């Protein structure tokens, strides 16, 4: 098999997922955090799923990070991760929501209050 420029192998994503096109868990997002459960993986586990479990052995990764390490499309890793979650081999946590924007008026009042304390 020949590779593409950039070193990424030319393998259709459906081969790594066993022909599955959609994850069984649609809420699994690009920034969902994956961690291994520590359960022993069955011997018949497909190679791509075992590779994902191996990447998670050292700690948590987002779906995007795992995709980069495995050199697979994010869509394929979502399918692999969902299958592992279904088998209780991986835990998936929703992405951490972005912080709310601070209120500039509140920040100004706090700064003014700190300045007033400094001059007392």
Image (spheres, rainbow, N blue to C red):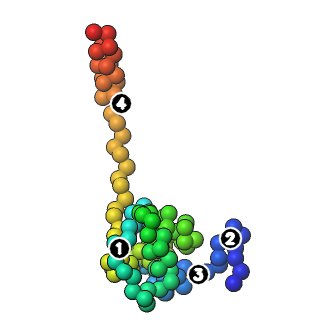
Contact? badges 3 and 2 (CB < 8 Å)? no
Residue of label 3: 12
The span from disc 4 to disc 3 (Cα, nearest Å) is 49 Å
Q: Indicate whether 36 appears above or below 100.
A: below
- Dot 4 and dot 3 residues touching (CB under 8 Å): no
**Other-residue count near label 4 (Cα within 10 Å), few / some / many at <14 / 14–19 / ≥20:** few
Pick the residue in front: 40 or 108. Answer: 40
Q: CA distance from mark 2 to mark 1?
A: 32 Å
Which residue carries the number 4 mark? 104
Q: Residue at x 65, y 78 (%)?
A: 10
Name the residue that disc number 2 marks. 7
Q: Earlier in the sequence, mark 4 or mark 3?
A: 3
Rendered-image quadrant of the N terminus: bottom right
Q: Mark 1 Cα within 10 Å, few/some/many (few <14, many 20+)?
A: few
Which of discs 1 and 3 lies nearer the camera? The answer is 1
Q: Is residue 61 left or right of residue 96?
A: right
Q: Position of residue 31 (x, y in %)?
A: 42, 61
At mark 2, the secondary structure is loop
Does residue 100 lie above or below 75 as drawn? above
Disc 4 to disc 2, C-alpha distance: 47 Å
Of marks 4 and 3, the one in the foreground: 3
Name the quarter where the C terminus is drawn: top left
**How many angstroms separate mark 1 from mark 4 (CA)?**
45 Å
Observer-nearest residue: 46 or 32?
Answer: 46
Residue 106 lies, in percent from the top left, at 30, 28
Which residue is under mark 1? 38
Q: Which of pointers 1 and 4 indicates the residue nearer the eye?
A: 1
- Earlier residue among tags 4 and 2: 2
Q: Is residue 38 left or right of residue 3?
A: left
Q: Residue at x 45, y 65 (%)?
A: 58
């Amino acid at each position: 098999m020949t590779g593409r420029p950039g070193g990424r192998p030319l393998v259709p994503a459906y081969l790594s997922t066993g022909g599955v096109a959609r994850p069984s868990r649609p809420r699994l997002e690009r920034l969902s955090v994956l961690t291994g459960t520590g359960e022993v993986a069955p011997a018949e586990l497909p190679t791509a799923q075992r590779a994902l479990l191996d990447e998670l052995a050292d700690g948590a990764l987002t779906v995007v990070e795992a995709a980069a390490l495995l050199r697979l499309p994010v869509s394929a890793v979502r399918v692999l991760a969902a299958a592992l979650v279904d088998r209780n081999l991986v835990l998936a946590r929703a992405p951490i929501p972005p912080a709310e924007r601070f209120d500039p008026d509140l920040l100004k009042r706090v700064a003014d209050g700190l300045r007033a304390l400094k001059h007392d």
